[in-house]
Image (cartoon, grey):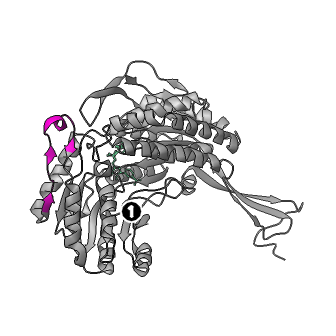
Amino acid sequence: MKLSNFINGEWQEGEATYTAVLNPANGEQLAEVRMSTKEDVDRAVKAAVNAQKKWALVPAPKRADYLYEIGRLMKERKEHLAQVLTKEMGKIIEEGRGEVQEGIDMAFYMAGEGRRLFGETTPSELADKFAMSVRAPIGVVGLITPWNFPVAIATWKSFPAIVAGNAFIWKPATETPMMAYEMAKIFQEVGLPPGVANVVFGSGSEVGTAMIEHEDVKVISFTGSTDTGSKVAELGGKHLKKVSLEMGGKNAVIVMEDADLNLAVEGILWSAFGTAGQRCTACSRVIVHKDVKKELETMLLERMEKLTIGDGMDESVKVGPVINKNALEKIHSYVQIGKEEGANLVVGGEILDNGDLAKGNYYAPTLFSNVKPDMRIAQEEIFGPVVSLIEVDSLEEAIEVNNGVKFGLSSSIFSRDVNKIFRAQRDLDTGIVYVNAGTTGAEIHLPFGGTKGTGNGHRDSGVAALDVYTEWKSIYIDYSGKLQRAQIDTE
Ligand code: NAD
């Protein structure tokens, strides 16, 4: 199967370079994807500019009707989409279904916004004058997404963008283009006006750069690594774009001495090894009170040894592959760094290549203990199934360790003490805080994003996402029939 761009409601034809899409579970080729050029981006932007002018005039509740239809088709195809997702990305099928569900939820939720998109009305300081603010669409927006959530993140961005009256160009990650292709088919089937939704495949350096540099693309919404995000911000700044960035994490679960340890272990396993540790919200640090450190470590080890590893299409598997060979090497190099830094490797720390596993990219769930907060394995994003256990003496120290990294996406605390919980939710410097749950599990009607090196103040999903894709317009209607000067004619 050859995946081509979806531009102006049509599948782009003609000569192009293609690259293979591989199943990370077994190395099999799933498809070939077009590596687009700057000219392809220009074509998509031109289509989007034309379409957006008319789209902005369609009443928002009517725009929302398309989203209801998109949500309905996604629901109808949920199992098919989940299987495509698991094959191209590797996450276990249960999580694949969960991710598709997130997209469905986002479709219905944002469709509801079509009948809200609230602005404000407020009294004017002058007589016979009316004042209000409304959300106005911005124009053409560029969406750049990572491979670890091939569909959910795109729905967090594209659905608010279109309900607000924008047109979009979506560049998915080259590793995971198949979900974007499936979504493009859905956009076509629901009859979205040509040019409102465009998908352009290709590399970040060619397609991403062309989108950021294009003068008709007014907003860039990016999710990916902090290194790439800062390049996007730099180039976007030069071209005076509105740039929304969601980037890396180094998320921690805090386990206090009064925690339900069984529950904490469940939360850690799910957050650290789900998606093979490749969620932006993955738990890669466990900050544990010294009184329960030994017990927690023993309990974790026991459970980790029972985790089944393999192809995510097998319903009994709990940990799937990582995305590619580069990721495997990066993870393994961090394990070597951890050992050299003096951390104690409790379990794991190896590339798995026995039997069928040799065909895919599998890394053993790994636990380090005696990790110091300033070690590189406790500071840098490894993006694999590797967890560091860090011992602390108090809640204050736990919070300090949690906050002592350059990222600020998600954090979690396990405790039964209401005072500790309330202090922690106030002082943990992350965009998301969980209490008595792991670091993952965001719901789409709340804002998603992080502080410090994780973001630049914007949020995906929730009503907050609308702030990325709208301009505030303030409107004053003077019906006094005379010139009234604000701040001057005050009598
Ligand atoms: P990445 O930064 O390598 O790539 C992300 C996207 O940017 C891809 O589509 C890529 O092609 C594109 N890109 C690459 N170079 C570019 C450039 N110079 N200009 C424009 N676009 C460019 O990230 P990845 O490896 O795909 O994803 C993993 C990273 O994403 C992790 O760091 C993870 O924490 C982060 N992430 C963050 C969130 C969040 O909401 N905070 C969610 C998911 C993933």
Task: Name the quadrant containing residue 162.
Answer: top right
Q: Is mark 1 within 8 Å of ligand 1?
A: no
Question: Residue placed at 12% from the left, 55% from the top?
Answer: 336
x and y, in percent, of residue 307 in the image? 24, 51
* Secondary element at image label 1: strand
Residue at 24%, 47% in the rendered image: 308
Q: Is residue 383 above or below residue 6?
A: below
Is residue 85 rendered to the left or right of residue 448?
left
Say if residue 42 shows up in the picture: yes
- Name above or below for residue 435 compared with residue 181: below
**Quadrant the C terminus occupies:** bottom right
The residue that label 1 is drawn on is 410
Asked if residue 351 is among those painted magenta in the image, a careful observer would answer yes
Instruction: Find residue 459 and report its horizontal and vertical position in percent.
Output: 49, 57
| Residue farthest right in this picture | 481
Instruction: Tell me if mark 1 has few (under 14), some (14-19) or many (20+) residues whose alpha carbon lies within 10 angstroms of its own.
Output: many
Q: Quadrant of the N terminus?
A: top left
Q: Nearer the viewer, residue 216 or 404?
A: 404
Task: Give the residue at x 77% y 68%.
Answer: 486
Q: What amino acid type is highlighted by mark number 1?
A: Ser
Q: Toward the viewer: 134 or 79?
A: 79
Q: Which region of the structure is painted magenta?
A: 345-362
Please indicate whether residue 184 sits to the left or right of residue 326 in the image.
right
Q: Is residue 174 visible?
A: no
Q: Is residue 31 left or right of residue 74?
A: left
Picture coordinates of residue 253, whole percent (x, y): 32, 66
Q: Position of residue 454 (x, y in %)?
A: 38, 59
Q: Quick check: is 275 in the magenta stretch?
A: no
